Amino acid sequence: MAEHAITPRAKDFSEWYNDVIMRAQLADYSPVRGCMVIRPRGYGIWELMQQALDGMFKETGHQNAYFPLFIPQSFLAKEADHVEGFAPQLAVVTHGGGKELDEPLVVRPTSETIIYSMLSKWIQSYRDLPVLLNQWCNIVRWEMRTRLFLRTTEFLWQEGHTAHATSDEAETEARMILGIYRRFAEEWMAMPVITGVKTDSEKFAGAVRTYAIEALMQDNKALQAGTSHFLGQNFAKAFDTTFQTAAGGLDHVWSTSWGVSTRLIGGLILTHSDDNGLICPPRLAPIQVVIVPIWKTDTEREAVLQTCNGVMDSLKAGGMRVHLDWRDSMKPGAKYYEWEGNGVPVRLEIGPREVSQGQAMLARRTGGKAPVRLSEVAPATRAALDAIQQDLLSQARSRREQNSVRNVTKDQLVQLMDGAGGFAYGGFCGSGTCENEIKDQTKATVRLLPDPEFRSNPAPTKCVWCGQPATVEAVWARAY
Ligand SMILES: [Zn+2]
């Protein structure tokens, strides 16, 4: 198996990121530029993400469905902002079966249009509402500059689409999903996020409001990790999705859409990994525990194998995902190195000495090694996994807080974005002119107008850029 050396983060963060992916065999470049092959170890993480999110969506009443990959080109034109936003990124099919098509078909960049064309048929009355749909699928957005997981021409995601009888209900849904995304990011990915609303220039094409979760990566660039849109009646009007109200009138439905993608895997890597490779939070690790047996003689081998099998059984019975690395062809040290690069949270080393002493050596991917009693191996390993999960979250949170600056001045903002980076909180007058000038001069964008929980106290009173009274607080950062 080819080993892939890892460039240190301090030397070249971008190279480091690619090296971590290659070493852990999470993904590879495809023959088609901008597309990505997700290898089994990367796909295993995605499957665990899917299971967790899918469970949360279903608990809150959503059902999965599937809509086609091809969308008539004319559908996208029906919502003016939507087509303007997506036109540059579309892949269009003009031929099928050897003939030119009557109407070109767009490969879905997102599915609002095709879904609303169907909802118009399915929804007649308030009794048909709400409609709470989700689909797991792939998406194509033609990208000029791509990065594995973070920005690829084709990617995997989930897209939720809901229709409601009232504006309030749709808004509540959009906020509720934002809460699910936050919970998932923090409890599963151990990736702390801030929440809030996007400015008009950063919102989804066709939305009234876009809510988002934003995380700060190790290089102090922000990652938009999930978005939830309140669409108002924009798509309902474009597709004439109406319903008979309880009072007997006719109204357009109020709707939402929301999504997270394989980009989350990029966020996971950029949040936790180190110069030795991937660090995977235990809850999303396809292999949580690897058992590495150590032996020299055949007699030792027999005893060690028996113990290792017993340990594997008790860990599996305890609900842990375990792998026993019984390869004859590799020395234990080489195995440690390989599993370290793969990000497996816990390694158990068991040799003749451990067998005779009734213990195993437990090594954490995040550092530290200690013996555990074989009689307590399952609860001890479970406790180590839980501790790693918690530590990763609290470390990431304190790193973010150390790199968040409150009440920045104009000079500080410029210096910060040219230098260390991070989240810069400051007053904002809300004008597009200030927003654009800041973007031009610092390459930083407004990541969010933060929710109350994340706002500064006292609130900033003046716009960072123009000095006029601030209407809101904003968080700036350079972003992926
Ligand atoms: Zn201003």
Image: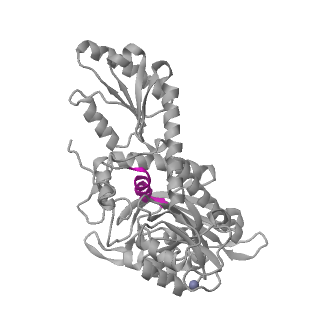
- Tell me if I can see residue 395 in this picture: yes
Viewed as shown, does residue 204 lie left or right of 16? right
Query: Residue at point 24% right, 48% down?
Result: 4
Q: Position of residue 160 (x, y in %)?
A: 54, 61
Nearer to me, 117 or 410: 410
Q: Position of residue 347 (x, y in %)?
A: 38, 33
Q: Position of residue 123 (x, y in %)?
A: 63, 67
User: Where 247 falls versus 135 (above or below)?
Assistant: below
Q: Quadrant of the N terminus?
A: top left
Query: Residue at point 62% right, 74% down?
Result: 473
Nearer to me, 242 or 283: 283
Is 454 in the magenta? no
Residue 237 sits in quarter: bottom right
The residue segment tinted magenta is 260-273
Viewed as shown, does residue 447 lie left or right of 455? left
Coloration mode: one colour
Q: How many marks?
A: 0
Query: Residue at point 63% right, 53% down?
Result: 61
Nearer to me, 140 or 326: 326
